[in-house]
Structure formats: C-alpha cells, structure tokens
Amino acid sequence: MKKLADKTVFITGGLSGIGRACALAAAKEGAHVAIAYRKSAAAAIAVEDMKYRIPNAFFIDCDVSVFAQVQAAVEKVVSMFGKLDVALNCAGIGGEPNKLGEMSEHAWLKVMGINLSGVFNCMRHELAQMEKQKSGVIVNMSSILGKVGFAGAAHYVAAKHGVIGLTQTAALEYAKEGIRINAICPGFIDTPMIAKTSIGKNAGVEQHIVGLHPMGRIGKPDEIANGFLFLACDESSFITGTTLEIDGGFLSE
Ligand SMILES: NC(=O)c1ccc[n+]([C@@H]2O[C@H](COP(=O)([O-])OP(=O)(O)OC[C@H]3O[C@@H](n4cnc5c(N)ncnc54)[C@H](O)[C@@H]3O)[C@@H](O)[C@H]2O)c1
C-alpha cells in the first residue's frame, strides 16, 4: 500500500531543492501533487521538467508572501481535487547575510514576508479548508536555525523560530479537529539555496559548515523528503506540534 495513495498534497516551493524532492517522493507514494511556484524563466523550465516526472501534477503560480494569491491557490487545489489532505509549506529564501546592526529594513521585511508571513498565509487558508473537512496534515519547513542563533542571519533565524511558534500554536488549536501540524528542522542541505551562498562558492566556508554537522557532511534533499513522508502519512498519526530535526547531529553539539 502506498503511503499517500489518493491524497491531495499541496507543496509551496515544490520546483526546487527540498520541496522538489518532497513532491517527487509524494507522487511516488501515490499522491496527487499540486505545486505552488513563483513565476520566473527558471521556474518555467522547472515546471516542464516536473511535468515530465509527475505527469498528473498541478501547477499554480503563487507568491506565498501575498495573502490573496495563497487564498486563490488553495481554492484552486480544492476545486481541482475536492479536498486538501496534506500541505507542505516549504517556499523560502536565505536572505542577504548581514550583522543585525547593519541589516536593512528591506532585507528584514523580505525574509519575514516570505519565510514567516508566507507560512502564516499558507496555514491560514489551508486550515480553513482542513477545518471544514475535519482532517488534514500540515508540515512546515523550519530549520536548525529555528532552534539556535546563527551570526549574519538574524532575519532568517527569527523567521524560522517563528515558524516553530506557528506550528506549535496551530497544533494546539486544531488537535481535536483531526488536523496534525508539525515542522521539520533540516541541517544544511545541498540545494540551489545553499549553492547560491558563500557556502557553495567558497571551499573554506563549506568546510566550516560541514564541520558543524557531527556526521561530517551536509544533508541531501531526499533525506528531508523521507521525514516529510513520515509526518505526512498515518505512520505519524499521534504526532502533532513537534519538530523533526534532520540535521546530521548539528543540534546535539
Ligand atoms: N537548504 C538548506 O540548507 C535548508 C536548511 C534548512 C531549511 N531550509 C528551508 O527549506 C526550504 C526549501 O529550501 P531549499 O534549500 O530547497 O531552497 P530552494 O531555493 O532550492 O527552494 C526554495 C523554493 O521556494 C520558492 N520561493 C521563494 N520565494 C517564494 C515566494 N515568495 N513564493 C513562492 N515560492 C517561493 C523558490 O522559487 C524555490 O522554488 C526553505 O524554507 C528553506 O528555508 C533549507
């Protein structure tokens, strides 16, 4: 029996990195996959690639930082599939690194708008639908940086801590409604987001980051997808309000 047979799975940021790996894993486990993505030339190519890999996937142009666009995206998924079983709120950005005392308001608001308000926007509309159904699962993509500080990334760290707060609070509010809400805290994972930063461009920085993981390497998107599948399916039926750390031991140091 496939883990997500006939489930409708909505994934933001599902064209790249972790979200893409989760979309492919969900499709392999029998899900109907709906991917929300932000329009760009690169996204158009990625959509074609995903159409080839998941022929029945559904694609929706949606900027998660815009409340009305997220509402419309969730409504489209429900009108297409009749229900929303699983939502993975994965869209995110790294943000420009800077010390807090030198961080621009623009840089702060951009990261908060996508990484925190974006997750609020998604949960707000997903929960409204799931409450009607009296069922559903939400998985939010937080980070190890939702648990500890990290110099140069105050905006990202604050947003990812906020995602855990949203997860725990919503889990309490909806525990009796048949809706489970959890977060994943990945360590550093080999994705385009990381490739764009100094970690991907500077061997010394990469060695430092690798050294923060006791397992002596950074993670792979598929390793996060395995955790997502577990939280999304009934194997985790008594788990809500928790964080799953998939971090090669980073947070145990
Ligand atoms: N890679 C890591 O080391 C790592 C570690 C911990 C947590 N995370 C989190 O995992 C998630 C996925 O990251 P990734 O590493 O796969 O990065 P990625 O850049 O490969 O993927 C992020 C996706 O989010 C999309 N996105 C960005 N802004 C958006 C917006 N406003 N609306 C809709 N989509 C938008 C991008 O287009 C992209 O498809 C992020 O939330 C990130 O913070 C990543």
Image (tube, rainbow, N blue to C red):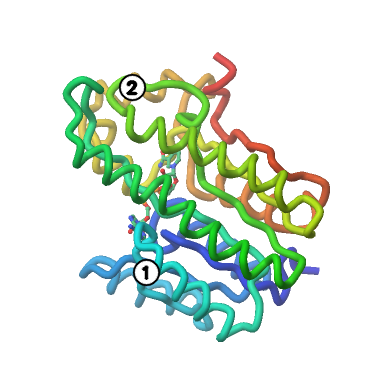
Instruction: Pinpoint residue 86: horizontal percent, then vertical percent.
Output: 64, 63
Q: Residue furthest top?
A: 253
The image quadrant of residue 36 is bottom left
Is residue 97 positioned above or below 173 on the image? above
On residue 185, the disc is none
Instruction: Pinpoint residue 158: horizontal percent, then vertical percent.
Output: 41, 32
Q: Specify the quadrant that holds the N terminus.
A: bottom right
The image quadrant of residue 183 is top right
On residue 207, the disc is 2
Q: Residue at horizontal 21%, vertical 35%? A: 201
Is residue 185 positioned above or below 236 on the image? above
Mark 2 or 1: in front is 1
Relative to 182, 40 lies left or right: left
Residue beneath label 1, please?
A: 62
Callout 1: SS: loop
Return the disc, 2 or 1, that comes first in the chain's sequence: 1
Q: Is mark 1 within 8 Å of ligand 1?
A: yes
Do the CB atoms of the residues marked 2 and 1 lie less than 8 Å apart? no
